[in-house]
Amino acid sequence: MENFLQQVINGISLGSIYALIALGYTMVYGIIKLINFAHCDVYMLGAYIGYFCMTSLKLGFFPSMVIAMLVCTVIGVLIEKIAYKPLRNATRIAVLITAIGVSLFIEYGTMFFVKANVRAYPEMTGFLAKSFAVGGLKITAQQILIVISTIILMAMLQFIVKKTKVGKAMRAVSLDKDAAELMGINVNSTISFTFAIGSALAGAAGVLVGIYYNSIDPLMGVIPGLKAFVAAVFGGIGIIPGAMIGGYFIGTVEVFVSGYGNSLYKDAVVFAILILILIVKPAGLLGKNTKEKV
Amino acid sequence: MLEIKNLDVHFGVIHALKDISLTVEQGEIVTLIGANGAGKTTALRTISGLKKPTRGSIIFEGRDITSISPQDRVKMGICQVPEGRRVFSTMTVLENLELGAYLRKDKAQINKDLNMIYERFPILEKRKKQAAGTLSGGEQQMLAMGRALMSSPRMLFLDEPSMGLAPLFVKEIFDIIKSINQTGTTILLVEQNASMALQIANRAYVMETGSIVLTGTGNELMQSDEIRKAYLGG
């Protein structure tokens, strides 16, 4: 039982990170129907920006995370403006291939600047280095930090999407671009805003993963990115609460497979889930099966 | 108020609108009738800015708006109720109405307009917390019209407002259009239901395969043999 609860705690921590990344995939898909493969690299860049803030600039954790989020916001918007906006009326496959290109460009471009070697994240000190024993369970301060940061970010996201004008515009554009435009909504700036928010969340996830796993490298985004994508599909791609649920589900499953089974299979199980969900309920957990409109 | 001169629109090689010219004067209801595929919706989409013309100009209140963005057109007081209603289905009725006032900043006046819309369409107030997609077709049409009115337009474009509605609702929708017009909003109405449209319109244009083939007052066209045969069932 103790082991079980311990795995749940680990699963929630990892799931938080997947959920943060999955939100970016799902929001962008919701608004322009694109799987933004470059999203996982924004997450990687977030980890590096946090790393340089903490090592070269000697900043603390929170300012580093905020800077990483801000820089990632700019990067996300630039990617959209440079790579995707000119293809607004192109076929979906053209944009998808472009996204893969952008992803590879960022990965190997980053490698050129920071070298391919793995870097160790700075050691956390003070409160962030502590861990607590509750009953027989071990909870680290970093896990608490990850979960609380994620909850705050998700609450902010929900507030923006549900209550603010720009959030309503985002939902309107994702439901019906033409109708939104006829109401005077600027579709392009709404799309930019969506990339901005998704990238900020990815940046936060990057820094959190850095302090959690302690190591970063230019290709670190690939596998977590794919898993977050699976999480988004699991919850129903385009649906924000779906990405949150999916993230926690995939994180927990992965931890349990490692904890009770064989950690070599943890990636395989996640992708098996993708295959299963595509066979059983392609629209995802919260998705409705929609008929293709003619 | 609105003047369209020699408008040409192409979809690739398809010549969808051919040399369209029409005018709408302040306070009028003008209707554009014609069969399916005649180019009526394309004409409205071009005036709203969703489709770029290849030639010609659109003048609204003396200003050339041919190349300005749809947003700027809404700001100038033009709003379109699109064909098939196109309400934001998973958003609430209230959120839909709020989005109609997206470009406005005058909070007090927006609230007043919201109440005015609830007065005009009491059913929308009753359903304001409900997702728009759960409304009936007629209610959705009312919502689409209410949403457009929330932008406080001086000119309203309506694209097939009677499409897919029960006959009882059709009559109601046309009464509402008339009353919107009486409160000072100029209306350009695109309809396949020619007899209803001609009854409420001051003037009408008839379109056929991308061109305007006939124009006159609503009454004149209702009397015209050609129109009766083609659109009014004898």
Image (cartoon, coloured by chain):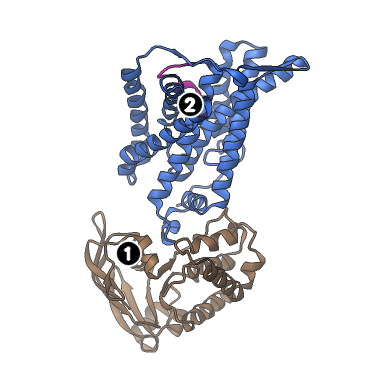
Chain colours: A blue, B brown
Report whether A125 appears left or right of A92: right
Kindly tell me whether residue B85 is visible in this rendering: no
Above or below — where is A42 with respect to A291?
above
Mark closer to the observer (1, 2)? 2
Report whether A84 appears left or right of A39: left
In x, y percent, where is residue B158?
44, 71
Residue position marked by numbered label 1 in the rendering: B46
Mark 1 — on which chain does it sit?
B
Magenta stretch holds residue B43: no
In x, y percent, where is residue B71?
38, 60
Residue located at (61% from left, 64% from top): B136
Camera-nearest residue between B194 and A167:
A167
Residue position marked by numbered label 2 in the rendering: A225
Q: Residue B206, located in which quarter of the rendered image?
A: bottom left
Q: Secondary structure at mark 2?
A: helix
Magenta stretch holds residue A222: yes
Camera-nearest residue between A125 and A51:
A125
Report whether B113 appears left or right of A72: right
In x, y percent, where is residue A242?
59, 38
Instruction: Name which residue type carries label 2.
Output: Gly
